[in-house]
Amino acid sequence: MNPPKLRQSDSVAVAPPRTGSLGIRNARSGFDYLIVGAGFAGSVLAERLASGSGQRVLLIDRRPHIGGNAYDHYNHDGVLIHRYGPHIFHTNSAQIVEYLSRFTRWRPYEHRVLAHVDKQLVPVPINLTTINRLYGLTLEPSEVEAFLAARAELVPEIRSSEDVVVSRVGRELYEKFFRGYTRKQWGIDPSDLDKSVTSRVPTRTDADDRYFSDSFQSMPLHGYTRMFENMLDHPNIKIMLNTEFEEISAEVVYDRLIFTGPIDEYFDYRFGELPYRSLRFEHQTLNQPNFQPVAVVNYPDESVPYTRVTEYKHLTGQQHAKTSLTYEYPAAVGDPYYPVPRPQNAELFRKYQRLADQTHGVHFVGRLATYRYYNMDQVVGQALALYAKLAPQHRHLHAPATAAVAGQVAQATLSSAAE
Ligand code: FAD
Ligand code: UDP
C-alpha cells in the first residue's frame, strides 16, 4: 500500500468539523457524517445514524464494492465466493443477531475444519476423534483428558501463543497443528505472538468437531453483500466506491468523520507503521461438483506455502456442477488484514490511540482503526457501542429509544467479545 499523503495540521486534528462547532450547522448542505470504509464497522454506523438518528451520511470505500472483507459475489462460473477468504458468522450475542436479522435471513451452518496432518485429514480443534485417529486409539473422553494431561507442559505464566498450546496438549501436537501454521500465517514464531491468537482455538476431549462453540452460527441466506445492500438502502445514505479518503476529504462538506481504515495511515504514519499481516488469495474453480469433505482444510505443515483451502459450497449450500476454492498464502505486504497481537505493537497502537482521543470530531472504529483482532460480530458490537454514544447528541432529531437499544447490544457484545 502506498502511504497516502493526508492533510496534517500542526498538532492533532487532521479532519476537523467543516461547519462551525459540533452539531451546529451553518446550512443544511453537505453531510452530517463522512464514513470511511464500507465494511461492517462503517456500514453499521451508516445504517444506525441514517435510520436511527436521521443523519445524512456519505459512505466511501477505496474498493469497488461494499462489505469490506466480508464481501461475497458470484464469480464468472456463477459460484458464490468470498473474495477475501472464508467468513463464517458466529456470535453469543442475541442482540447482534436481532440487529443483523433486520437485513438478512439466515442459513444455519456449523463450521467444521479438518487439518492435513501425518498424511491424513483429522478434525481441528483437536478433539477425541483427532487423538484416536492420529494415534490409532479408541479412547473415551476421560481418557483423552488424561492423555493430554500427561503430555501437557507446565508453563508457570502463559504469555505467548506457544505457551497456550504446549500447556494444553504438549509439544508434539503443538508442532503438528500449530507451530508451522502460525509461523506461516504470522511470519513469526508462536513464542513471539500474544497468547490471544492461539487461544482462539479450543481443545476438546469429546467428539464435538465444530470449529466454533457460539450459540448462534449461521450464514446470511443470500450472502453478505446482499445483507449490506439491505443495510445501506436508505435515502440518507450516499455511497461512493473507488474513492480514497484523501481524494475527497478536502472537497466534501461534513460535520464529523468516522474512520474505519488503518489508524496509522490516517495519521500519516507519524509514529511509524503498525504491522498488519496480509494474505494473497488464489481463487480457482474446478469442473467437478466437490473437492474436499468440509468447507476448510488447514495445512499446518510449513513446507506447504498456503495455510488453508476453502470450498465455498459447504458454506453457502449452493448446488452447482462446478466448485470454487480459495487458497490462502500469507504475506508481509498487501492489503492489511490482521493486526499482529504482540506487546510492542500494542504499545505503538496506544500512541496512535492517544492521538485519536485528542482528535475532535473524528471517531475510529473497526478492526483496522482500533487494531483489534475482532470477528465480525465484535465489530458490529463495537460500531453499535459507538452509535450508542453518538445517538443522544442527535436525539432532538429522532427516536431516543434507539440509543438505549444500541447501548444494551454494545454492552452484551463487548462482554462476550472479551472472552
Ligand atoms: P474492513 O472489512 O476491513 O473494512 C474497512 C474498509 O475500509 C475496507 O473496505 C477498506 O477498503 C476501506 N478503507 C480503508 N482505508 C480507506 C481509505 N483511506 N479510503 C477509503 N476506504 C478505505 N470474522 C468472523 O467473524 N468470521 C470469520 O470467519 C472471519 N474470517 C476472516 C477471514 C479472513 C481471511 C479475514 C482477513 C478476516 C476474517 N474475519 C472473520 C474478520 C472480519 O473480516 C472482520 O471482523 C470484519 O470484516 C471487519 O470489518 P471492518 O469494517 O472493521 O473492516
Ligand atoms: N492455528 C493454527 N493451526 C490451526 C488453526 C489455527 O496454528 O490449524 C492458529 C494460527 O496462529 C491462527 C490462529 O490459531 O492464526 C487463529 O486461528 P483462526 O482460525 O481463528 O484464524 P482466522 O480464521 O482468524 O484466520
Image (tube, helix red, strand yellow):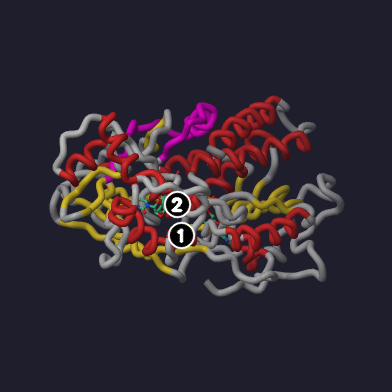
The amino acid type, in three-letter code, at marker 2 is: Asp
Tag 1, which secondary structure?
helix
**Is the distance from the Cβ of mark 1 to the nearest ligand 2 atom less than 8 Å?**
no
What's the CA distance linking mark 2 and mark 1?
Answer: 7 Å
What residue is rendered at 22% in x and 53% in y?
A: 116
What number of labels is visible?
A: 2
Residue drawn at 39 percent across, 40 percent down: 202
Front-most of residues 54 and 393: 393
Which comes before the other along the chain, label 2 or label 1? Answer: 2
Q: Which residue is mark 1?
A: 191
Residues 258 and 146: in front is: 146
Q: In front here: 218 or 201?
A: 201
Tell me whether circle 2 and circle 1 mark residues in contact (CB < 8 Å). yes
Q: Where residue 159 appears, x then y in whole percent?
A: 52, 52
For the residue labelled by badge 2, is the local secondary structure a helix, a strand or a loop? helix
Read off the magenta span.
Answer: 89-113
Q: Residues within 10 Å of mark 2 (few under 14, many from 20)?
A: many
Quarter of the figure with residue 246: bottom right
The image shows residue 313 at horizontal and vertical percentages of 25, 44
Instruction: Give the percent coordinates (x, y) of residue 154.
Output: 43, 47
Above or below, 345 relative to 49: below
For mark 2, what is the residue?
163
